Structures are given as structure tokens and as C-alpha cells.
Image (cartoon, rainbow, N blue to C red):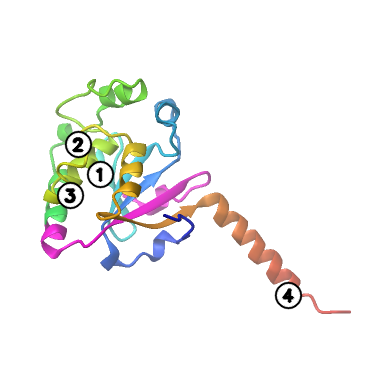
Amino acid sequence: MTENKFIDPRGIPIQDLPLIVLSDFSSGVIQSLIKIRTSGSFSHIMVMHRKNFFASQGNMFSEAPLSRYMKDGNRLKFFSIKNLTEEERWALAKKMEKDLSAPWWQRFYDYPGILGQAFGLRWFNSPFRAYCSERVAAWLRVLPRMKNSIPLHPSPEDLNDLMKAEEKNFEFYGIWDSDLMANMEVHNEVSGNIAGISPA
């Protein structure tokens, strides 16, 4: 699977949602430990459930604007769910609505679990809370065809590997890279300036 399809997430059409989104921005020590421990590129995973918004497990599971993640030093990788039926789409939407409207104590971050991930102790977690990849895994397991293939306590990199491998269920949608976008903007600006120079 090639991963050289670069996209502007702001232009993703509503009919293509929901999308599963990986982020490699390491905002803290724990996220960095996870990337080192899993030998992966990604420390966070979330769902773009409506246009320009993610359902993301931070300190609390809540909606986060796209702009929060389109920042310098970040990369966003998008996957779609293949052959999503209307019934499956409805089930995923209901699960997301339920999770986002749950009491605060059910939306709180699973700090014991993320420490367990960082140190390779996946059994070490809170049964009443979730970290980001647990949240996305539980959301995906709403679909009967995913129930046996999605692990209970995956890391973001586990889900990245699974989605790349399970081509019958997932498809790479595109990638946004802040560094690449910045280089393209500089290139376009330079090209434009050169094109605008008239011979003496």
C-alpha cells in the first residue's frame, strides 16, 4: 500500500466520514515513551466524525477542532472503513454520540492504562476509563465484522499496522504533513516569484 496521497483535511467531504486518524505529534513524555516502546511513528489516534472536528481522547473524551492538530511538527494519517453500510454507519454514529455524551468520569483519560502502554504492561489499566487507542478500538468493535480482529488494549501503532494489513476492512485515505506542506508553500512561492520576473 502506497502512502503518498497528500490531502488537505479541511477539504474532506462529509460523505467520506467517519475517518480514523493517527497523529504523531508528541506533546509530552508519555506520548514519546509510547512511540519509543512501540517503535512506531504515531502516539495518538482519533476519529474524524464530522467535518473539521475530531472525537479525541484527551484529558476528557470530547470534540476537538481540526485546527488543534494542523500544527507545526505534526503529521495526520487518515484511514477509511471499506464498504461501510448505512446500518454500520448508523451504529458507529450512535456509539460515538453515546461516548461523547457520557458522564465526565466515563470520559476521563485512562492514565494507568497509558502508563501500562508506555512500559509494555497492557494489563495495567482502569476498567472504567480509556486512552485514545482503546477508545477507537471499542468504537470499531461495534461492527460485527471487526469484533474478533480489533484488540482490546492496542497502541496507536498497533491499529496503524492492523489497518494497513486488513485491506478488506480499511483503506488508506491520505496524509497531511506540516513539514511537507510548508516546503510546498515555499516552493510555490519561489516558483511564483520566478515566474513573475520579466526579462530586462
Disc 1 versus disc 3: nearer the observer: 3
- Residue on which disc 4 sits: 195
Between the residue at mark 4 and the residue at mark 3, the CA separation in whole angstroms equals 49 Å
- Residue on which disc 1 sits: 62
Amino acid type, label 4: Ala
Quadrant of res 113: top left
Q: Position of residue 150 (x, y in %)?
A: 21, 41
- Residue on which disc 2 sits: 107
For the residue labelled by badge 1, is the local secondary structure a helix, a strand or a loop? strand
Between the residue at mark 1 and the residue at mark 3, the CA separation in whole angstroms equals 10 Å
Q: Position of residue 170 (x, y in %)?
A: 29, 54
Amino acid type, label 3: Met
The tag earlier along the polypeptide, 4 or 2, is 2
Find out whether residue 92 is within the magenta segment: no
The tag earlier along the polypeptide, 4 or 3, is 3
The tag earlier along the polypeptide, 3 or 2, is 3
Magenta part of the chain: 64-90
Q: Is residue 62 left or right of residue 68?
A: left
- Residue on which disc 3 sits: 96
Judging depth in this view, the residue of 82 and 76 nearest the camera is: 82
